Image (cartoon, coloured by chain):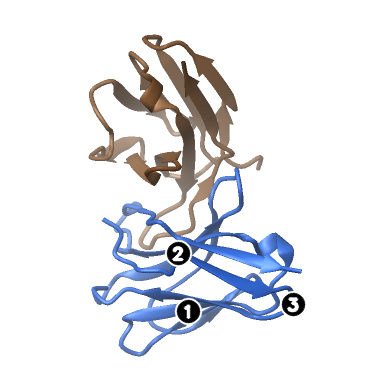
Amino acid sequence: DAGVIQSPRHEVTEMGQEVTLRCKPISGHNSLFWYRQTMMRGLELLIYFNNNVPIDDSGMPEDRFSAKMPNASFSTLKIQPSEPRDSAVYFCASSLAHVANTEAFFGQGTRLTVV
Amino acid sequence: DAKTTQPPSMDCAEGRAANLPCNHSTISGNEYVYWYRQIHSQGPQYIIHGLKNNETNEMASLIITEDRKSSTLILPHATLRDTAVYYCIVRLPGQGGSEKLVFGKGMKLTVNP
């Protein structure tokens, strides 16, 4: 398996534009996590899904952020409209969880710059 | 809402054992202790986890105190590639799905030649 795949790897956009980040989890995994990382705030959990259902979105900063998981092999994180303070590295992770937690595998991240 | 405390940084000599401490004094009976690390500009990488017993795998050993209020991650022979930020996390067991995986500030380990 190629691991968790995120696209794009780098994104530069202008303030006010819509940005869509994409994640393909490892095949067979049933949990998916979105994180944002900045120097100031560290690694923040934004939202996570179990079996394609959002379980906890309390980390989503505001209504400009939305995440979807239409099927087990794809998820998106959308920011509309984007602002300079959204500049960060966004990570997606997936894991296989049944009765007990298992390790989460992270993608390489998307570095977002909003100018 | 990280429930762990780690020193901000630590240095270790290459080839020596690195002992990374973590305090989790409010851990509940069914919470696991997890360790991840993040090498610069990469996504975090799982290392090991445990509940009560000490654990060992090809990467590291995890020593959990009897009262479970603290733990130590041991890298037996640190190499320069082990330089990274190490995160100690406590986490509930999943029930048909994953529980939250919340990272704190972590601890920067620098392995020196």
The residue under label 2 is B8
Q: Residue at x 70, y 77 (%)?
A: B77
Tag nearer the camera, 3 or 1: 3
Task: Give the letter of the brown chain.
Answer: A
Indicate the chain on which mark 2 is placed. Answer: B
Query: Helix, strand or loop at disc 1?
Result: strand
Tag nearer the camera, 1 or 2: 2
Point out residue A7 in the picture as x, y percentages from the top left corner: 56, 26
Query: Helix, strand or loop at disc 2?
Result: loop
The residue under label 1 is B72
Residue B34 visible, this orientation: yes
Quadrant of image for the N terminus of chain A: top right
**Residue type of the residue flagged with mark 1:** Thr
Task: Give the letter of the blue chain.
Answer: B
Residue A50 visible, this orientation: no
The residue under label 3 is B15
Q: Which of the two labelled residues, at mark 3 and mark 1, occupies the earlier sequence position?
A: 3
What is the count of numbered marks? 3
Tag nearer the camera, 3 or 2: 2
